[in-house]
Image: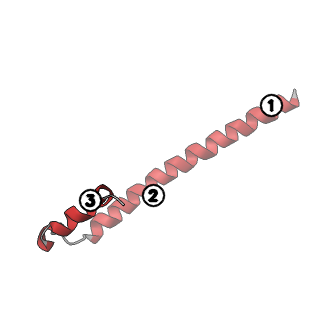
Amino acid sequence: MSMSKFKGIADIEEKPQDTRFEVRERLNLNDLLKKRSEEKTKDKKTNILIFSSASAVAAVVLLILSL
């Protein structure tokens, strides 16, 4: 095995322990709830788009089969 494969691991081990971890702020529950509600809205829009596309394809297939 060559040492070049493990170069990234060696770099991490050489750094002092206090610089490997950044200080993070506390998680704000309101921010998390806001992000989740935005995700739900985005998911609803995506689901409506998928459903309407599938319905349009089904309608076209039925139209073609009925001819």
Q: Which mark is residue 10?
A: none
Colour scheme shown: secondary structure
Q: Amino acid at mark 1?
A: Leu
Q: Residues within 10 Å of mark 1 (few under 14, many from 20)?
A: few
Distance between the Cα atoms at labels 1 and 2? 34 Å
Task: Look at the numbered disc 1 and give the secondary structure of its residue.
Answer: helix
Task: Look at the numbered disc 3 and give the secondary structure of its residue.
Answer: helix
Note whether 67 is above or below 48 in the view shown: above
Visible residue check, residue 33: yes
Question: Tag 3 or tag 1, which sits nearer the N-term?
Answer: 3
Visible residue check, residue 21: no
Q: For mark 2, what is the residue?
A: 40
Question: Tag 3 or tag 2, which sits nearer the N-term?
Answer: 3
The spot of residue 40 in percent (x, y) is: 45, 58
Question: Tag 2 or tag 1, which sits nearer the N-term?
Answer: 2
Tell me the mark number nearer the camera, choosing from 2 and 3: 3
Q: If the image is split into quadrants, where does the N terminus sit? A: bottom left
Q: Amino acid at mark 2?
A: Lys
The spot of residue 60 in percent (x, y) is: 75, 32
Task: Look at the numbered disc 2 and give the secondary structure of its residue.
Answer: helix
The spot of residue 10 in percent (x, y) is: 23, 64
Q: Is residue 21 left or right of residue 39?
A: left
Q: For mark 1, what is the residue?
A: 63
Q: Residue furthest front?
A: 1
Q: Is residue 50 left or right of residue 35?
A: right
Mark 3 and mark 1 in contact (Cβ < 8 Å)? no
Mark 2 and mark 1 in contact (Cβ < 8 Å)? no
